[in-house]
Amino acid sequence: MSDATTPEVSAPDAPALDPFAVALGTLPGVASVIMERDERILHANRGDLAALMTVLRHDARFAFEQCMDVCGVDWPQREERFDVVYNLLSVTRNDRLRVIVSTDETASVPSVTGIWPGTAWWEREVFDLFGVTFDGLADHRRIVSDYGFEGHPLRKDFPLTGHVELRYDEEQKRVVYEKVALTQEFRNFDFLSPWEAMTTLPGDEKAHRPATSAPAVKP
């Protein structure tokens, strides 16, 4: 187990941490800090997220004034299958930081709308597409999918066909929703071009014929 004041590194050959990343690792609520592709990635404890984000926003040492984006990632094989990712920008220091917190299908993530009010739109989007709820978010209405949509379409276990389909009904003169009805069986395609899919061509059999001896010439 690593020391609580030292940020963890995920792999022995991971890039060395700079002093700023080391300072991030000393903050309460930080599980680890790593460098990946010259970017700092901070993994935070879910329960400490709001307090940690407040420090990152208001502490002059960090000064991440803007939250540029909030998005989600689904890892179905994990117990806490969802990552909620916050991309922060410091205009003062011209620096960026990615903060990641994990959760499952039932536990709520603390909302950061009290720190960056504009993140309400993105938190609603993560809720709509992944089903992650946010503790403190005042509005959990869907923002991308339609009203009455069933399920969360960016989950890896969401069916490719969806659950419902819509069409215009000429008799009712309106758009109607119905259960998905496949008109043909689901097929798998190899996506090869016609030339790549053709393993043999007419005439190829001649190249594989056994050689025949030439007829004897009469004297």
Image: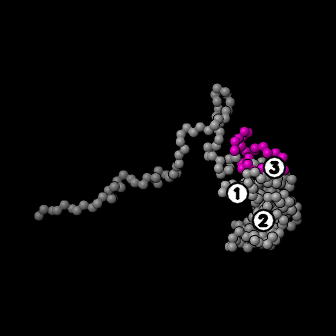
Q: Decide if residue 207 is on the left or right side of residue 11.
A: left
Q: Is residue 218 magenta?
A: no
Q: Which circle, 3 or 1, is nearer the viewer?
A: 1
Q: Which circle, 3 or 2, is nearer the viewer?
A: 2
Q: Which circle, 1 or 2, is nearer the viewer?
A: 1
Quadrant where the image shows the C terminus: bottom left
Name the residue at 83% across, 69% down.
Answer: 26
Q: Decide if residue 77 is on the left or right side of residue 97.
A: left
Q: Position of residue 29 (x, y in %)?
A: 82, 63
Q: Mark yes or no: residue 212 visible.
A: yes
Identified by mark 3, the residue type is Ala
Identified by mark 1, the residue type is Glu
Q: Position of residue 138 (x, y in %)?
A: 84, 46
First to last magenta residue range? 128-151
- Label 3 and label 1: CA atoms lie apart by 26 Å
Label 2: how many Cα within 10 Å (few below 14, some 14–19, many 20+) = many
**Do the residues bearing badges 3 and 1 touch, measured as CB atoms within 8 Å?**
no
Q: Is residue 164 positioned above or below 88 on the image?
A: above
Q: Is residue 138 magenta?
A: yes
- Label 3 and label 2: CA atoms lie apart by 25 Å
Tell me the SS state at disc 1.
loop
Q: Position of residue 168 (x, y in %)?
A: 65, 32
Most foreground residue, 157 or 209? 157
Mark 3 / mark 2, whichever is N-terminal: 2
Where, by quadrant of the figure, is residue 116 drawn? Answer: bottom right
Name the residue at 75% across, 48% down.
Answer: 127
**Do the residues bearing badges 1 and 2 touch, measured as CB atoms within 8 Å?**
no
Most foreground residue, 218 or 153? 153
Residue bearing mark 2: 31
Residue bearing mark 3: 120
Residue bearing mark 1: 79
Please, what is the dominant secondary structure of the magenta stretch? loop
